[in-house]
């Protein structure tokens, strides 16, 4: 009988916790965006970058740049996105070019960002991603990463802001 009483008490407590959780209001967080970490091609890598920024996972975003981070140091990188509350990226047609054992993929992009004050800004430009031929790499393996980025603020509507073409470094 004591065993049944304990089982009932455990079920009542568990049921109360579940009911309380269901009754609690849902809070929308940036982390509600699905996690995307895809380095299978240049466009997906850039989309993963902005997914990390959207989710406020700045260390992950910073790591996509390999050994050439854009802001010099991590603190400056984070500071640049601190006021961003929403970000969206559109990619254009990606080309690939090989050179000296590496594969470069220039990625045309348009980025829409909204800050804490509700100000929307549109940026357009190019990311260049790079991977060294995996067959010639020694450990540690260096995955596809962002080699460079050149974006500028534009007045063009977001839907039309993606550049037609980008070029790999020569």
Image (cartoon, grey):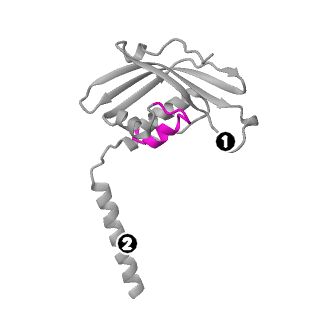
At 67% across and 25% down in the image, what residue appears?
103
Q: Which numbered disc flags the more N-terminal residue, 1 or 2? A: 2
Residue 153 shows in this picture: yes
Q: Is 89 on the left or on the right of 41, as rendered?
A: left
Viewer-nearest of discs 1 and 2: 1
Residue underneath mark 1: 141
Residue sticking out furthest to the right: 135
Queried whether the magenta region covers residue 23, the answer comes back as no
Q: Residue 126 carries which label?
A: none
At 61% across and 23% down in the image, what residue appears?
105
SS assignment at label 1 = loop
Question: Is 72 or 151 nearer to us in this picture?
Answer: 72
At 52% across and 11% down in the image, what residue appears?
164
Q: Position of residue 137 (x, y in %)?
A: 72, 38
Q: Position of residue 1 (x, y in %)?
A: 39, 88
Q: Where is residue 127 in the image (x, y as percent from the top left)?
A: 52, 23
The C terminus lies in which quarter of the figure? top right
| Magenta stretch: dominant secondary structure | loop
Residue sticking out furthest to the front: 72
Queried whether the magenta region covers residue 61, the answer comes back as yes
Q: In which quarter of the image is residue 57?
A: top left
In contact (CB < 8 Å): disc 1 and disc 2: no
Q: In this view, does 65 lie above or below 16?
A: above
Q: Is residue 91 above or below residue 17?
A: above
Residue 1 shows in this picture: no
| Crowding at mark 2 (Cα within 10 Å: few <14, some 14-19, many 20+) | few
Residue sticking out furthest to the left: 117
Residue underneath mark 2: 11
SS assignment at label 2 = helix
> What is the span of residues highlighted in magenta in the rendered image?
55-70
């Amino acid at each position: 009988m004591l065993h049944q009483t304990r089982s009932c008490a455990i079920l009542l407590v568990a049921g109360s916790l579940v009911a309380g959780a269901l009754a609690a209001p849902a809070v929308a967080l940036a982390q509600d965006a699905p996690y995307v970490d895809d380095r299978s091609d240049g466009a997906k890598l850039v989309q993963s970058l902005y997914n990390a920024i959207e989710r406020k996972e700045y260390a992950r975003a910073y790591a996509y740049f390999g050994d050439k981070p854009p802001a010099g140091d991590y603190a400056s990188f984070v500071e640049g996105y601190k006021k961003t509350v929403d970000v969206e990226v559109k990619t254009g047609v990606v080309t690939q070019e090989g050179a000296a054992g590496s594969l470069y993929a220039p990625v045309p992009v348009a980025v829409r960002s909204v800050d804490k004050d509700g100000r929307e800004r549109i940026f357009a430009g190019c990311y260049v991603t790079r991977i060294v031929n995996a067959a010639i790499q020694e450990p540690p393996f260096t995955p596809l990463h962002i080699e460079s980025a050149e974006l500028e603020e534009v007045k063009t509507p977001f839907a039309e802001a993606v550049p037609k073409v980008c070029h790999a470094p020569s």
